Image (tube, grey):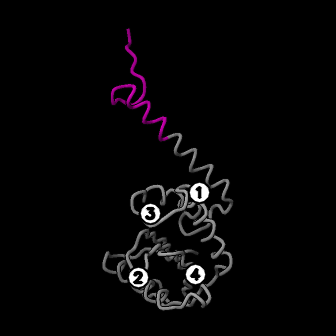
Amino acid sequence: MIKGVMIVNNHGKPRLVKFYQNVTSEEKQQSVIRNVFQQVAQRPDSFCNYLEGIIPEWGENIKLIYRHYATLYFVFAVDSQESDLGILDLIQVFVEALDKCFVDVCELDLIFHADLVHYVLDEIVMGGMVLETNINNILQAIQDQGKMHSNSLKNTTSTGGAVGPISKHV
């Protein structure tokens, strides 16, 4: 099971954090992010992209599987039953989906379009379980969601702020 997904920049600032296993307080959440970043950032890029981590809030036998792209670390914290290579592939699918949504995704895209980043992640992972790995299906779902959003905005503006058409009863 996936315990959490984090995107953190080279300075340790979180750009996306999604926990699938409860971390009770904000202080503990900050502790998890700091702990994960410290374990991942100290490793040279020549080392493998997964390590056994100790995250007190989630217990022992947590694997941190990550990729370092330019200024961002994409980190998935998983239990020992998840496949290391499968999660590395999942990270690649996530990054490719973001890259197609933003055309060469960068840190500013994650900051200014956090909602879209969460939509993409939600199409891939829900409740700590992998839903979809086919990038075409993911992008189609995001595109469909964008169309529904555009249509709802059109309906709202065409009716003067009211939702849906208004009819008079005689």
Q: Residues within 10 Å of mark 4 (few under 14, many from 20)?
A: many
Disc marking residue 65: 4
Left or right of 108, for residue 1 = right
Mark earlier in primary sequence (2, 1) = 2
Residues 134 and 23: in front is 134
Q: Residue 110 has which mark?
A: 3
CA gap between label 2 and label 3 equals 20 Å
Query: Which residue does the image show at 51% across and 62% down from the upper left?
Result: 105
Tag 4: amino acid = Ile
Where disc 1 sits, the SS reads helix
Magenta residue span = 149-170
Q: Position of residue 95 (x, y in %)?
A: 58, 66
- Residue type (three-letter) at the residue carrying disc 1: Lys
Determine whether 150 is above or below 43 in the image. above
Q: Quadrant of the C terminus?
A: top left
Task: Reply yes or no: does residue 157 show up in magenta.
Answer: yes
The circle on residue 32 is 2
- Residue at image location 64% in from the left, 79% down from the top: 82
Q: Nearer the viewer, mark 4 or mark 2?
A: 4
Q: Is residue 52 left or right of residue 29?
A: right
Upstream in the sequence, badge 4 or badge 2? 2
Residue 56, horizontal then vertical, whole percent: 43, 88
Frontmost of labels 2 and 1 is 1
